[in-house]
Image (tube, coloured by chain):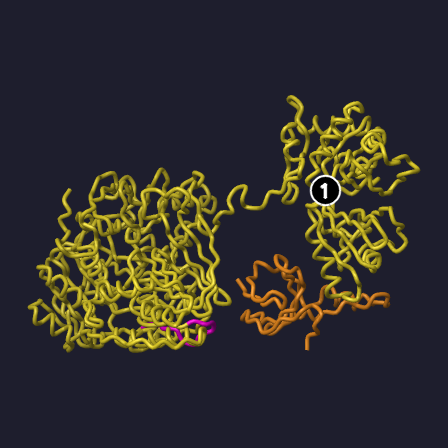
Chain colours: A yellow, B orange
């Protein structure tokens, strides 16, 4: 198939590299630098999906993040991803995509019958139509709605891609690389500030790529390229394309998602697919620009109806014509710029301007080029089903309420411009109180709460000269405050065509006897009539109207629909827009993949895994492991086909009859030193500690301040002012914090130091009637007799050249000992115990047998310390 | 994520800290006869202020020191931080 809508010699794409891709099974070609959207339009494809509710045909509406229609299921390197915007997805070799929300195919979609049943699917239809009988909801209605609605399908396979997180600090974070972003970044960088400049698209420059301006004797694009290449060379500047700053959180922390590999056929080795940046910025400059808003008219969702700025971008960036017989419908000068671009490329557009007699340089240029302009004209309705074929147009009265005679004119696309809406999402997320700006009919940031400044079009300033000036100044001023440098930059001479005021017109009235659907929200199929119903039914708050009608709730979050929705509500309610207010802007500004949010914390990386020094031995000896807090502990050592019950029973029995050994390395250990150590223990445990002699251990119970048991364990007095405390595996960290709390805040007069030594010691519990015999053989030079090492006694010993601590402590009510050695000797100790223990029929035992033994003896088992019982209840 | 000033280490992100409750609550003195009401007040009864508030944080993944931080509970603004040993004025 030929790219019959591609212009020659126009655009920023690389024509030397042809790329093949598939859409709905059919092969097409585009060029490197295309998006999926621009490549499809170049091939004359305008039908990409079906709408959410009525399954009406869907085409392209925008050229970027604001796109409500062109959502596809993407296939890349054996993986699939739902809800990808064709306008954002860059083309790569072998890309495959399919339409969503249609069955059996986008051309013949059974769900489109909803279009004829729309009387049954009004606002809030979920709450009305499917209410009776009640029992039908789960079995019939819900599964049906889920199948009929919904967008793409998520992959159920494990995602093999890698996603990373990065934490960064900077002086200035600048979101957006249009004129205001570039100017402020340049000024700040020249002052030596650490700057991060983020651009969500692949190309830097924003509107400079498409506008006909002159900055310092260069085109807008040349100037942008020059600034970018200079910034790239500066060590204090990080510039990132394909990076969306999507959330503004507390204390000037912003989160940005960088799409590193999404534009490639497959992720390079050792590269992540996406990276999430957590950026703490001293100052944030919001240079996010503005989004053109549509004018509402009949059947304004027909494929071929699109934003005039998108048509211009397809033409200037991608060299693609959205139509060869375009109709421009505008209430301001922006539509003329698009018309002029068409005209310059040999296409004759027709302009319908809602204004009666606009006068400006841009309008004059269009007139001089001989473009057919109809003033005080509107599009009443688009005609055509899967693509615009013509438009019903009419003259409109000065009060914008009466339509003249309807005429029909042929066209293959309708480019709409209803003026510009500043992208205030980030400012609003930061806590900025927005205000309504009458002259542009839109909200702009008001008073800042955090260190944030909004520049240029995002601040409602639509002239380049003013934008560049204020951005240079802001970048200079803020960076000067941080770095104390004062490098003056000469301000370039700016030439741009002057425009005149827009017409505050946003919705074409219905002609007599016609009942066209006039859509506000294109992704969720919310029409003017739906809002009218919601208000008739008593919904007043804009937040309620939004939720009842789903206006602005789709994946595009109403970027093109919110303001027109507000206009409608305020008109019906007879209020002014600021009195209606806008719904809350919440992060993320654009959808973020779950993978990027999760980062590397997947599967076994979702929490640390701690292993004792004897872990390899356990593995070799068929241990079945269990998670104990963050530790892996042997639950039992499987012999043959034993199950858990049989294995643990055998191990427990062997402890009772011979001797067993259990890895107790995971027990929390805290080293306590200082003259007041005994006093501290006396205060944090329920029992008395002042009289514990050196070389003896004692069991203690620790309570929280509310009397609930927090932990238990033994503490041994190693020497005069030196104690060794053990805690349960799970509570080790909390007990340390608890002790630090008392020592630092409550009783700072106590002269005590505490430090965790859990990882420094490896521990083995030796239990059973033959444990003493075994111990004597392990420590031939120590006296471990009942008299030499009595119950709760402690001594130090020599284990074949390794220094060891020996405690006569029983976890399970048996005659038992605990031996500790430095961690790196843990395996040596364990192997010695197993080797010498052979003659006593030693067997290792796991946590299951340990619990069995404890419960049999009436001891508290770990899981009973559940933070719900007092001392007495235990 | 909040940005908290540790008086020992400087500005650090919230994920290095753990929250420790109201910093103005004083534990009843040791050895003193304490009524149930007094103990209740120490353990449970909190004003849950909206606005400026002194609270305890522990710099868990840093110096492990407990610190006192003055924060606005509504806006999250942080005004001041003190070492454990410093008195709230």
Q: Position of residue A140 (x, y in %)?
A: 42, 42
The quarter of the image holding the N terminus of chain A is top left
The subunit carrying tag 1 is A
Q: Which residues are magenta?
A: A442-452
**Left or right, residue A538 beside residue A95:** right
Q: Residue furthest right?
A: A787
Residue A180: x and y, percent?
Answer: 32, 70
Q: Observer-nearest residue: A169 or A586?
A: A169
Is A30 placed left or right of A263 in the picture?
left
Residue A448 on the magenta span:
yes
> Residue at coordinates 70% horizontally, 57% vertically from top-left?
A737
Is residue A2 at least partly visible in the picture?
A: yes
Q: Position of residue A727 (x, y in %)?
A: 74, 48
Q: Which residue is mark 1?
A: A822
Note whether A391 is above or below A427 in the view shown: above
Q: Main secondary structure of the magenta part?
A: strand
Q: Residue at 21% of width from left, 66% of height from top?
A: A211
> A165 above or below A840?
below
**Is residue A435 highlighted in magenta?**
no
The vertical placement of A813 against B57, above or below, is above
For residue A54, say whether it is visible: no
* Residue B74: percent from left, percent from top: 55, 70
Residue A705 falls in image quadrant: bottom right
């Amino acid at each position: 198939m030929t790219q019959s809508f591609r212009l020659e010699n126009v655009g920023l794409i690389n024509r030397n590299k042809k790329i093949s891709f598939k859409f709905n099974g059919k092969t097409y070609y585009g060029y490197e630098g295309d998006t999926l959207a621009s490549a499809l339009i170049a091939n004359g494809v305008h039908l990409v999906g079906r709408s959410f509710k009525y399954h009406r045909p869907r085409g392209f509406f925008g050229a970027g993040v604001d796109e409500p229609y062109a959502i596809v299921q993407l296939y890349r390197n054996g993986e699939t991803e739902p809800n990808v915007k064709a306008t954002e997805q860059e083309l790569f070799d072998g890309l495959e995509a399919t339409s969503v929300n249609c069955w059996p195919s986008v051309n013949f979609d059974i769900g489109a019958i909803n279009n004829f049943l729309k009387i049954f699917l009004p606002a809030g239809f979920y709450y009305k139509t499917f209410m009776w009988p009640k029992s039908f909801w789960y079995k019939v209605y819900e599964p049906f709605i889920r199948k009929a609605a919904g967008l793409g399908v998520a992959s159920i396979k494990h995602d093999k891609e890698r996603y990373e997180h990065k934490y960064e600090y900077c002086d200035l974070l600048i979101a957006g690389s249009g004129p205001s972003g570039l100017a402020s970044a340049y000024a700040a960088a020249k002052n030596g500030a650490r700057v991060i400049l983020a651009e969500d698209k692949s190309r830097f420059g924003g509107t400079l790529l498409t506008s006909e301006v002159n900055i310092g004797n260069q085109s807008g694009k040349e100037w942008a390229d020059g600034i970018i290449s200079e910034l790239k060379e500066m060590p204090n500047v990080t510039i990132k394309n394909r990076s969306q700053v999507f959330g503004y959180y507390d204390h000037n922390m912003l989160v940005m998602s960088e799409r590193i590999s999404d534009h490639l056929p497959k992720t390079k080795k050792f590269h992540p697919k996406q990276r999430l940046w957590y950026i703490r910025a001293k100052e944030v400059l919001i240079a996010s620009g503005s989004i053109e808003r549509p004018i509402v008219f009949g059947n304004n969702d027909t494929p071929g109806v699109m934003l005039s700025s998108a048509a211009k971008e397809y033409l200037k960036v991608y060299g693609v014509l959205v139509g060869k017989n375009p109709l421009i419908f505008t209430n301001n000068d922006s539509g003329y710029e698009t018309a002029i671009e068409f005209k310059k490329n040999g296409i004759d557009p027709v302009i319908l301007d809602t204004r009666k007699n606009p006068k400006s340089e841009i309008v004059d240029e269009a007139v001089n080029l001989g473009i057919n302009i109809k003033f005080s004209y509107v599009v009443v309705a688009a005609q055509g089903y899967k693509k615009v074929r013509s438009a019903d147009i009419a003259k409109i009265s000065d009060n914008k309420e009466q339509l003249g005679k309807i005429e029909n004119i042929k066209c293959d696309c309708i480019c709409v411009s209803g003026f510009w809406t500043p992208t205030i999402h980030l400012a609003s997320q930061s806590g900025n109180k927005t205000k309504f700006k009458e002259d542009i009919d839109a909200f702009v940031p008001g008073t800042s709460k955090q260190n944030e400044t909004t520049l240029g079009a995002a601040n409602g300033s639509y002239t380049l000269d003013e934008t560049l000036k204020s951005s240079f100044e802001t970048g200079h001023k803020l960076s000067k405050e941080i770095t104390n440098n004062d490098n003056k930059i000469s301000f370039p001479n700016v030439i741009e065509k002057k425009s005149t005021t827009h017409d505050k017109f946003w919705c074409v009235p219905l002609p007599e006897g016609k009942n066209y659907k006039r859509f506000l929200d294109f992704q969720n199929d919310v029409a003017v009539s739906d809002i009218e119903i919601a208000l008739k039914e008593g919904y007043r708050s804009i937040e309620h109207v939004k939720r009842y009608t789903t206006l602005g709730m789709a994946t595009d979050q109403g970027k093109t629909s919110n303001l027109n929705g507000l206009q409608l509500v305020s008109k019906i309610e007879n209020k002014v827009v600021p009195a209606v207010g806008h719904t809350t802007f919440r992060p993320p500004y654009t959808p973020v993949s779950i993978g990027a949010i999760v980062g590397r914390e997947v599967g076994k990386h979702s929490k640390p895994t701690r292993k004792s020094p004897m872990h390899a031995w356990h593995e070799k000896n068929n241990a079945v492991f269990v998670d104990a807090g963050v530790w892996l502990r042997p639950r039992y050592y499987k012999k043959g086909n034993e199950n858990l019950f049989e294995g643990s029973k055998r191990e427990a029995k062997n402890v009772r009859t011979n001797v067993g050994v259990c890895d107790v390395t995971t027990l929390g250990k805290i080293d306590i030193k200082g003259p007041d150590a005994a006093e501290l223990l006396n205060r944090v445990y329920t029992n008395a500690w002042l009289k514990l002699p050196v070389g003896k251990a004692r069991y203690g119970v620790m309570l929280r301040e509310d009397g609930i048991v927090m932990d238990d364990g033994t503490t041994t007095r190693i020497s005069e002012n030196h104690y060794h405390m053990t805690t349960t595996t799970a509570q080790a960290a909390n007990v340390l914090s608890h002790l630090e709390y008392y020592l630092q805040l409550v009783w700072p007069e106590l002269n005590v130091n505490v430090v965790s030594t859990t990882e420094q010691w490896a521990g083995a519990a030796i239990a059973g009637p033959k444990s003493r015999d075994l111990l004597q053989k392990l420590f031939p030079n120590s006296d471990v007799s009942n008299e030499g090492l009595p119950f709760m006694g402690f001594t130090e010993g020599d284990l074949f050249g390794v220094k060891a601590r020996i405690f006569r402590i029983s976890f399970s009510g048996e005659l038992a000992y605990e031996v500790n050695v430095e961690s790196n000797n843990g395996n040596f100790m364990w192997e010695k115990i197993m080797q010498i223990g052979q003659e006593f029929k030693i067997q290792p035992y796991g946590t299951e047998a340990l619990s069995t033994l404890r419960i049999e003896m009436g001891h508290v088992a770990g899981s009973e310390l559940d933070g719900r019982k007092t001392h007495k209840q235990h | 994520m909040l940005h908290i000033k540790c008086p020992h280490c400087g500005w650090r992100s919230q994920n290095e800290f753990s929250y420790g409750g109201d910093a103005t609550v004083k534990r009843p003195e040791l050895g003193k006869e304490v009524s149930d009401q007094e103990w209740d007040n120490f353990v449970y009864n909190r004003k849950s202020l909206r606005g400026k508030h002194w609270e305890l944080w522990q710099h868990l993944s840093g110096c492990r020191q407990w610190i006192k931080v003055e924060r606005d509970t509504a806006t999250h603004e942080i005004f001041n931080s003190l070492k454990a040993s410093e008195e709230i004025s």
